[in-house]
Image (tube, rainbow, N blue to C red):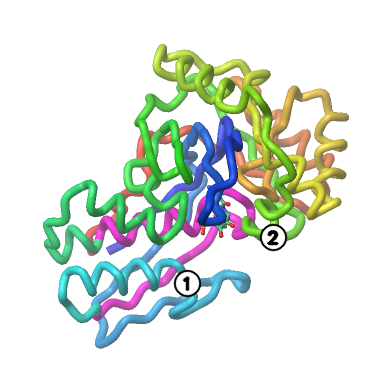
Amino acid sequence: MVLETYSKVNLTLELLRRRADGYHDLATVFCATSLGDRIAIAEATELSITCDHPDVPDGPDNLVWKAVARLAEIAGIVPRVRIHIAKTVPPGGGLGGGSANAAGVLAALARRWRTDLEAWEMRSLAAGLGSDVAFFLEGGAALGTRRGEQLEPLPPPSGTRIVVLAPREPVSTGAVYGAVRGFRGDAGAASARVAAALRAGEVPDPAWLANDLEGPACRVHPSLAEDRAALDGLGLGDARLCGSGGSWYVLTSLHDGGAVRQRLLDAFAGRAVYLADPVNRGWRVVSED
Ligand code: C5P
């Protein structure tokens, strides 16, 4: 079986408070994008996981391994599958590629193994693996609250494209959250506004997009502050950080996507720049064979 799993940008990411368990409550509007990875799953004698990207661990340290092991335990079976992940989504970029890999494999194997888990059980299993994993079970767009795992589905924006600048260096989500210094009094308002626009079938005004992790991420990685200054200098409108970074994205009209991608390629020599579209799912089966 071959799967395609997608990625996300956060149209908003607002920090509400630090919790007793060390996580942060937030309000975020996720938008799944077509930038995706390919995953091949084959019958085997035992579980193995490999990936073609040097920064992504093979074996038990891969989030996909944890997903498969947990699902197999719940289903009461021994997982006999060989999984290979062909990466396009840059790891450590805040694009949720690893979370999407885990969600796609989880959902596909739950179906193949006929686990009959309820949707809420799948969501809870996914949320236990990482804050963004539950989002990718359904993908599309959603308003996320609590750690980001409490989800209200929203229609994805149509009429916009997403240009993504790949990170210069991988970013640790935990380190960025660790550099958070405070919380805005009106945190949550931008997410409510963007969610309302999506519910009404409108493309949100790029000026409404917000990411409270930009300050902390730029403190941890000064190269991100350089990126931001360079992006501002291009006059393309606001660029926003993807999650905790280190990728940035710009929303463009359907017409301007290619030209904006070229501007970024010219301005950031040696960096990958992707042109993606919102998608109404988090993963899909490419081939059952
Ligand atoms: O859940 P996930 O493994 O993606 O989170 C990685 C780290 O990011 C957590 O260990 C935590 O430090 C931080 N985090 C947080 N609040 C969230 C999500 C993540 O503090 N809502």
Residue 170 is labelled as: 2
| Residue 110 in view here | yes
Quarter of the figure with residue 84? bottom left
Relative image position of residue 100 (x, y in whole percent): 43, 53
Residue 62 is labelled as: 1
Q: Quadrant of ligand 1?
A: bottom right
Left or right: residue 127 compared with residue 43: right
Relative image position of residue 219 (x, y in whole percent): 82, 49
Q: Considering only order in the chain, which callout, 1 or 2, is on the residue closer to the N terminus?
A: 1
- Which amino acid type corresponds to the residue marked 1 in the rendered image? Asn
Instruction: State how far apart marks 2 and 1 are (Cα).
Output: 16 Å
- Which amino acid type corresponds to the residue marked 2 in the rendered image? Pro
Give the SS element for disc 2. Answer: loop
Tally of numbered discs: 2
Relative image position of residue 65 (x, y in whole percent): 39, 73
Left or right: residue 113 compared with residue 127: left
Q: Residue at x 24, y 63 (%)?
A: 109
Near-viewer residue (261 or 213) = 213
Left or right: residue 286 compared with residue 20: left
Q: Which residues are magenta?
A: 80-108
Q: Residue at x 73, y 51 (%)?
A: 179
Q: Residue at x 61, y 56 (%)?
A: 90
